[in-house]
Image: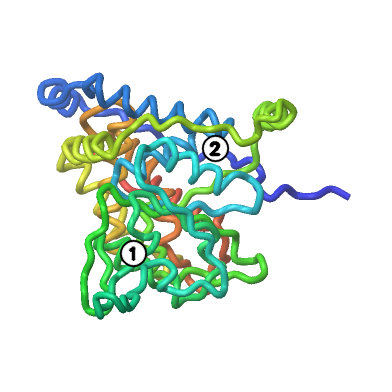
Amino acid sequence: MEVTPRNPPKPPLKISRWIPSDALMLESARTMNTLETASREKVAALRESIARIVKGKAETIELAVVALIAEGHLLIEDVPGVGKTTLGHALARALDCNFHRIQFTSDLLPSDVLGVSVFNPKSNEFEFKPGPIFSNIVLADEINRTTPKTQSALLEAMNENQVTIENTTYPLPRPFMVLATQNPVEHHGTYPLPESQLDRFLMKIDVGYPSADAEKEILHRYTNGNNSQKIQAVLTPADVLYLQDESRKVHINDKIVDYMIHLVHRTRNHPDIELGISPRGTVALFRTSQALALVAGRKYVLPDDVKRAAFPVFAHRLALARQVSKGKRRTEEVLEGILNETKVPE
């Protein structure tokens, strides 16, 4: 009996590439230059460090790095065993930052994530004991296996880089990033993330099954008894903050900003979409496009950056109308249609 794979190969997207006008090319040549060597080397070192552990997933690794540089949070969704946790762990370990992994379960409490006040009999006062959320990188493993009450404990942290406990607000360290993994909702024992929680994630990506060559390399690692390879930290917190600051300086032409807004408004007025992109989603597209340009070694954004960012940034934020068939592929088809129908700036 023929079995359909969980992640079948996707047909190439039918999206035309953008050819800039002479005026825009002259502006870019006059006012912009390529990214300085230090930034390019930092980005390349981070990608190479992760690629030593996560085999054959260059595109996925690049998007994870983009999410970090864009100061966003990343949701990794796929079936068990394809390397979701490995990817999150590799990204965290490639940074010389404070890191905590939280295994989300049905009995996990908000205080297990945020921290708790404990009475000290010596001082006769309550002392706050910070939880694992007070880290630079937090890996929320299988986030959809815990209850909505515990999931909501991350909302303030992800949106405002702070947590409020017993009427006291505590700032979180910088940089701060939540890497969350989850199994698809059709698996038993999961609690689907609400729209308010999904909107906090800059991007949602999948890992997919490895190629034959990559899987062979994984097996050789186990054969050699080196299945738990150590990863070397290549960037410090100061390096990450530097790259994030550089990404904010990446230039976006007003015509491309208008292009982004047209795409967003198209999702809000599309007959097949019930819930369009929020202003937070517009900001996410803006910052992701800047980070993509920086990773590509440019100090200016192209419409192709916007098109590439649209799928991981928009797909998890859209809710299709009830009369439209659901599913990830259908959402991508609707987005593909919007991209093809929206005029690209000249």
Measured along the vertical axis of the image, is residue 140 above or below residue 57? below
Choose between 323 and 277: the one closer to the eye. 277
Q: Position of residue 19 (x, y in %)?
A: 30, 28
Instruction: Answer left or right for 340 relative to 4.
Output: left
Q: Position of residue 83 (x, y in %)?
A: 59, 44
Element carrying mark 1: strand
CB under 8 Å between discs 1 and 2: no
Q: Find the residue positioned furthest to the left.
A: 31
| Residue 10 quadrant | top right
Element carrying mark 2: loop
Q: Amino acid at mark 1?
A: Pro
- The reply to whether residue 29 is in sight is yes
Q: Nearer the viewer, mark 1 or mark 2?
A: 1
Choose between 277 and 90: the one closer to the eye. 90
Instruction: Answer left or right for 266 relative to 145.
Output: left
- The reply to whether residue 334 is in sight is no
User: Local crowd at mark 2 within 10 Å, few (<14), some, or many (≥20)?
Assistant: few
Q: Which residue is mark 1?
A: 130
Measured along the vertical axis of the image, is residue 79 above or below residue 231? below
Q: Which mark is residue 12?
A: 2
Q: Amino acid at mark 2?
A: Pro
